[in-house]
Amino acid sequence: MSRHSTEDKIIWTVPAEEREALRLSLWNACVERATVCTACALSSTRHSVVFGEGDARSRLMFIGEGPGADEDTSGRPFVGRAGQLLTQILQAAGIERDAVYITNVVKCRPPGNRTPLPEESAACDGYLQAQILLINPAILVLLGSTPTKWILKTTEGISRLRGRWFDWRGISVMPMFPPSYLLRYPDGKKIGSPKHLSWLDIQEVKKKWDEVRSGASERGEEQ
């Protein structure tokens, strides 16, 4: 750490490698704590804690509702049918899944894949907020009503909010239909269908992400 003054102000600067070491230490501590978490009743029925997956330095982050049966078994988010569809949507838009970070509001599977209870979401919120803080994304994609209502503190449904950009703590936020919902609509080519609308939404996300990465590249920052 170095110190220099500008007139009457003292400015402390921390080398990038020290900042990254601290970030990684905090990240690992968060993962370890989540792995043994018993803050809510979901801990008694889970097989795995599904913390998240992907590039923890990405400027693009996706948040879903919670793990399903396949995710609970594997310990990875979005690996079942809905997850495979999400991967296809990303790839179609030119987004590599490994280049983004994917997590859920709750890290343990709710029984029967039901919607997480408010107290369950609250119990997991510290982990979610830590993920957002340490990843520091420029863009958050909220997959479904649960993450949208939780992050944006709104009562409006996903059908009214999807496809619109919101500002949350300086982060660009885009609500989208969850992949599990899209599985109910096999015809994705029909104009105005949920799949068609999601295709429009993910293209907006890709456009915004390209702008973020272009700006970072011009400034010589990590992308």
Image: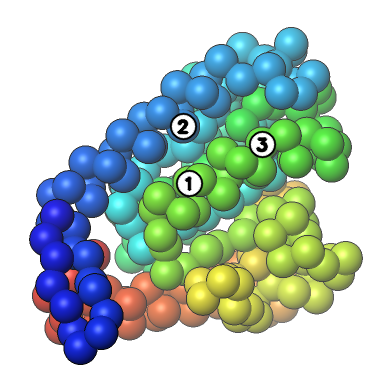
Element class at badge 1 = helix
Left or right position of 50 against 178: left
Q: Residues within 10 Å of mark 3 (few under 14, many from 20)?
A: some
Left or right, 86 with respect to 137, comes to right
Q: Quadrant of the N terminus?
A: bottom left
Q: Which residue is mark 3?
A: 124
Q: Position of residue 29 (x, y in %)?
A: 41, 28
Classify residue 168 as left or right of residue 22.
right
Three-letter code, disc 3: Cys
Q: Earlier in the sequence, mark 2 or mark 3?
A: 2
Q: CA distance from mark 2 to mark 3?
A: 11 Å
Label 2, secondary structure: give it. Answer: helix
Mark with earlier residue (1, 2):
2
Labels 2 & 3 near each other (Cβ < 8 A) = no
The numbered mark at residue 131 is: 1
Residue pictured at 66% horizontal, 43% vertical: 125
Q: Residues within 10 Å of mark 1 (few under 14, many from 20)?
A: many
Work out how far the residue at label 1 is from the one at label 2, CA to CA, in angstroms: 8 Å
Q: Which residue is more in the foreground, 184 or 67?
A: 67
Q: Is residue 22 left or right of residue 48?
A: left
Label 1–label 2 contact, CB within 8 A: yes
Quadrant in the picture for residue 105 = top right
In front of the other: 54 or 82: 54
Of labels 3 and 1, earlier in sequence is 3
Mark pair 3, 1: CA separation: 11 Å
Location of mark 2 (residue): 30
Residue 150 found in image quarter: bottom right
- Residue 22 in the image: above or below residue 205: above
